[in-house]
Image: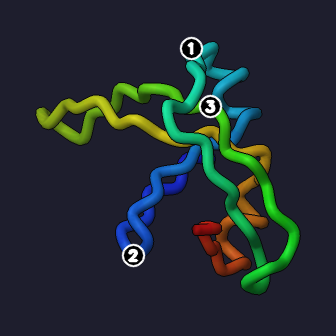
Amino acid sequence: MLILENGNQKNLISEDLVQHLQLAATPHPDPYKLGCVQKGGPWLTISHRCAVNFAIGPFRDILVCDVTPLNCVDMLLRLLYQQA
């Protein structure tokens, strides 16, 4: 699943979707930790990103997304925090 979230300005894509679409993931230039459910809760290290080409009608663009092991349900039901 691809998550475009304007509130915390993180564009995330699941590892499964990256593999399924055969997208090229590259090392993240500034890896960071992402936590779920509560601040200080279990942290995931975001260490890769990939470019996603998309189109909506005639509009076409490329979006760089951080690759996460979380699936859609995890992303939609939990609040995300970035560790400083």
Element assignment for label 2: loop
Position of 79 relative to 53 (above/below) = below
Q: Which residue carries the number 3 mark?
A: 48
Instruction: Please state which amino acid type lies under the numbered disc 2.
Output: Gly
Q: Nearer the viewer, mark 3 or mark 2?
A: 3
Q: CA distance from mark 3 to mark 2?
A: 21 Å
Label disc, if present, on residue 7 of the rendered structure: 2
Q: Which residue carries the number 1 mark?
A: 24
Instruction: Please state which amino acid type lies under the numbered disc 3.
Output: His
Q: Which residue occupies 64% across, 68% down?
A: 83
Element assignment for label 3: strand
Give 61 or 44, whichever is nearer the viewer: 44
Please report whichever mark, 3 or 1, sits nearer to the chain's N-terminal start: 1
Q: Which residue occupies 56% across, 14% down?
A: 24
Q: Pointer 2 and pointer 1: residues touching (CB < 8 Å)?
A: no
Residue 11 x, y percent position in the rendering: 46, 51
Quadrant housing residue 69:
top right
Residue 18 x, y percent position in the rendering: 64, 27
Q: CA distance from mark 2 to mark 1?
A: 26 Å
